[in-house]
Each structure stands twice: as C-alpha cells, then as structure tokens.
C-alpha cells in the first residue's frame, strides 16, 4: 500500500487562502498612488518630429495649379499596390472645348502646368506601408508626406482617400484651378519655382469664367501688390548657387 501523497510546497493556511485573490491586485493598488507618466491622448497630443512621415499630401504651385501631372509613377513604385491614379488631358476640360492645350500653351485652362493632370487619385490606407517610395518616384514633387498620423476610421471605405482628401488647401493668394498658366511660361518654369503667385491676367480669366469664386479677392490683392513672379520664358532669375 502506497503512502499518502504529500505536496512538496507547503500549503497555504486558511488566512492566506482568504486574502489570495486580493494579492493579485497588489501591483495595481501600489501603482495607483504613484505619479502618472501616461500621455493623455487624445486630449493631450504630443507633436511628432518634423521628419515623421504620415498621411500623404498633393501639393500646389504658388498660383494654385496642381503639381500632379497624372504620370502614375507613384502607383508603379508602390510595393503594396495602394495608389490608383488616372491622368487626363487639360484640353478635355470644359473650358477648353474650342482649343487643344499643349505643354507650350499657357493660355487655355489648366488644372496643372503642361498637357496632363491627375483626374483621379486614390490612396488605400488599408494597404499603405508608409515606405515613401511613391515620394521618391514623383518627378514634380507633387506628392509629399505630412506629420498627420490619425488615420483610424469606423469604416474600411473611409480609409480610401480620394483626391479632394489629399489636396493641400489653397494658400493665401492662390487661385482655385482650373485657370490659365502664368502668361509666357511653360511647365518647366513651374518646376523650377519661377512662378511665385497669380498674375492679373489669371485673376481676370477666373473673374470672367467664375465670378463667384471665393479665392478671387485674396488672389486679386496678391496679383496687384507686385509680388515677384516669373518674368517670362527663360528670363526668370534665381539666387546665385541655386541649381535649376
């Protein structure tokens, strides 16, 4: 007959068994009286570093035209297939029904300098891995990344950002597109940064075609104050040492 089993560890007495459930909260109870170091997000937000890469942004030129030319290089560079782009011709805009807009034509209506613009632009943030390869692929610096990191949402469809969600807001003095390019310039002048604001000719065109445009008053003020802008094709200057 085998001996009765005796546990190797001493058994707790009735008092220990009574307070055993409370012992598990010992760490919690002791921490309640210590100073808290937790960030009270979202009521208190800590700004990220300037180099932080968050939500994407489609940029504009100083006169309000969009930088995106619909080349789709960002979509080709994306390893997660998160970007969808459809390019279109500026000549297809309703304002250009009677003319064909080319890269050298600055008189017709444009969404972006040159012949084409990005008509459809989508980024699926359910797929995006924020690698930044799309930024490197963009030839016009149209696509950059902001410091915005709050991208959570209640629906999956809401995380597919459209062009209007990604476009940078119009700055002070910018004219809402479409409108003509700065007279006497080409898309190359825009890429070089020679255009620094709208001109009276652009303001007059928008006033004729869209008299109720809310960007007109500020743009008219900037256009008449003589802020430096491109002096024409091949004549604009830039600071010494700055390469085109």
Image (cartoon, rainbow, N blue to C red):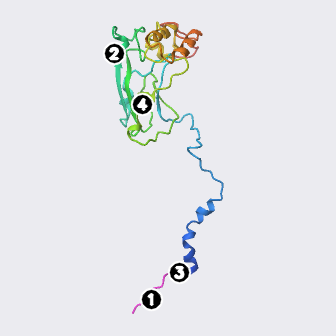
The crowding category of the residue bearing disc 3, from other C-alpha atoms within 10 Å (few below 14, some 14 to 19, many at least 20), is few
Q: Is residue 6 magenta?
A: yes
Answer with the quarter of the image where residue 88 lies: top left
**Where does residue 221 sit, x and y in percent of width and height?**
57, 12
- Residue under label 1: 4
N-terminal of the two: label 1 or label 3? 1
How far apart are the two marked residues, 2 and 4, measured between alpha carbons? 27 Å
Is mark 3 in CB contact (under 8 Å) with mark 4? no
Residue at the image point whose x is 60% and y is 43% from the top:
44
How far apart are the two marked residues, 3 and 4, measured between alpha carbons? 65 Å
- Residue under label 4: 134
Q: Is mark 2 on a helix, strand or loop?
A: helix
**Where does residue 72 sit, x and y in percent of width and height?**
36, 26
Describe residue 103's horizontal placement relative to residue 217 as left or right. Answer: left
How far apart are the two marked residues, 1 and 2, measured between alpha carbons? 94 Å
Decide if residue 201 is in sight here: yes
- Residue under label 2: 92
How far apart are the two marked residues, 3 and 2, measured between alpha carbons? 86 Å
Q: Which of marks 2 and 4 is in front?
A: 2
The crowding category of the residue bearing disc 4, from other C-alpha atoms within 10 Å (few below 14, some 14 to 19, many at least 20), is many
Q: Is mark 4 on a helix, strand or loop?
A: helix
Asked if residue 81 is positioned above or below residue 95 in the image, the reply reads below
Highlighted range, magenta: 1-12
Q: What element carries label 1?
A: loop
The disc label shown at residue 11, or none:
3
How far apart are the two marked residues, 1 and 4, measured between alpha carbons? 73 Å
Is mark 2 in CB contact (under 8 Å) with mark 4? no
Residue at the image point whose x is 66% and y is 54% from the top:
35
């Amino acid at each position: 007959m085998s001996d009765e089993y005796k546990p190797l560890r001493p058994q707790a007495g009735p008092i220990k068994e009574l307070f055993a459930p409370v012992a598990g909260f010992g760490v919690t109870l002791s921490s309640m009286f210590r100073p808290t170091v937790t960030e009270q997000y979202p009521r208190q937000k800590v700004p990220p570093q300037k180099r932080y890469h968050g939500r994407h942004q489609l940029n504009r030129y100083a006169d309000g035209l969009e930088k995106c030319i619909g080349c789709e290089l960002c979509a080709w560079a994306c390893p997660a297939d998160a970007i969808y782009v459809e390019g279109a011709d500026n000549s297809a805009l309703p304002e250009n029904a009677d003319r064909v807009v080319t890269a050298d034509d600055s008189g017709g209506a444009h969404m972006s300098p040159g012949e084409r613009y990005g008509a459809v632009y989508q980024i699926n943030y359910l797929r995006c891995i924020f690698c930044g390869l799309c930024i490197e692929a963009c030839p016009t610096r149209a696509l950059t990344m902001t410091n915005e990191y709050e991208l959570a949402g209640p629906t999956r469809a809401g995380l597919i950002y459209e062009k209007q969600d990604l476009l940078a807001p119009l700055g002070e003095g910018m004219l809402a597109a479409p409108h003509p390019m700065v007279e006497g310039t080409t898309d190359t002048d825009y890429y070089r940064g020679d255009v620094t604001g709208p001109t009276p000719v652009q303001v007059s065109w928008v006033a004729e075609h869209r008299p109720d445009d809310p960007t007109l008053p500020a743009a008219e003020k900037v256009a008449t104050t003589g802020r430096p802008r491109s002096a024409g094709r091949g004549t604009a200057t830039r600071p010494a040492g700055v390469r085109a």
